[in-house]
């Protein structure tokens, strides 16, 4: 679940953990919001779970969750 989107990050909750991913908001021609970030920038969960390893499956789950919510709103997500 997306908790927050700003010009410089997106914050997501998966189960009982959150992650703040740095990135960049942009505005594509469809008058909706877009957000871009790099998978490599997903480094760790937010406190108090920062010591739990972030797995490749976690990363894919996070991207899928964001993509699903963006698709519902007609928004654009770019992940590199």
Image (cartoon, rainbow, N blue to C red):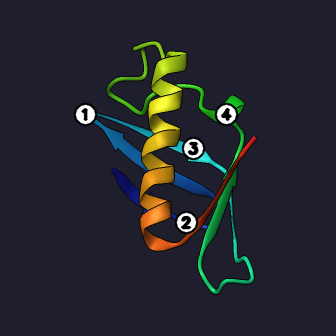
- SS label for mark 3: strand
Dot 3 or dot 4, earlier in sequence: 3
Q: Nearer the viewer, mark 2 or mark 4?
A: 4
Q: What percent of the width, then of the height, locates residue 53?
A: 46, 12
Q: What percent of the width, then of the height, locates residue 40?
A: 70, 29
Judge whether 2 appears above or below 60 on screen.
below
**Mark-to-mark CA distance, 1 and 4:** 20 Å
The residue that disc 3 covers is 21
Quadrant in the rendering for residue 32:
bottom right
- Mark carried by residue 39: 4
- SS label for mark 2: loop
Query: Which residue is found at the position 51% from the left and 51% from the top?
Result: 67
The quarter in which the C terminus is drawn is top right
- Mark carried by residue 6: 2
- Mark carried by residue 68: none
Relative to 57, is 1 on the left or the right?
left
Q: What percent of the width, then of the height, locates residue 72?
A: 42, 66
Quadrant in the rendering for residue 50:
top left
């Amino acid at each position: 679940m997306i908790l927050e989107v700003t010009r410089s990050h997106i914050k997501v909750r998966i189960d009982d953990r959150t992650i703040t991913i740095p990135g960049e908001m942009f505005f594509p021609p469809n008058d909706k919001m877009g957000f871009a970030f790099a998978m490599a920038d997903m480094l760790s969960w937010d406190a108090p779970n920062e010591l739990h390893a972030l797995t490749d499956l976690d990363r894919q789950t996070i991207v899928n969750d964001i993509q699903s919510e963006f698709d519902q709103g007609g928004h654009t997500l770019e992940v590199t």
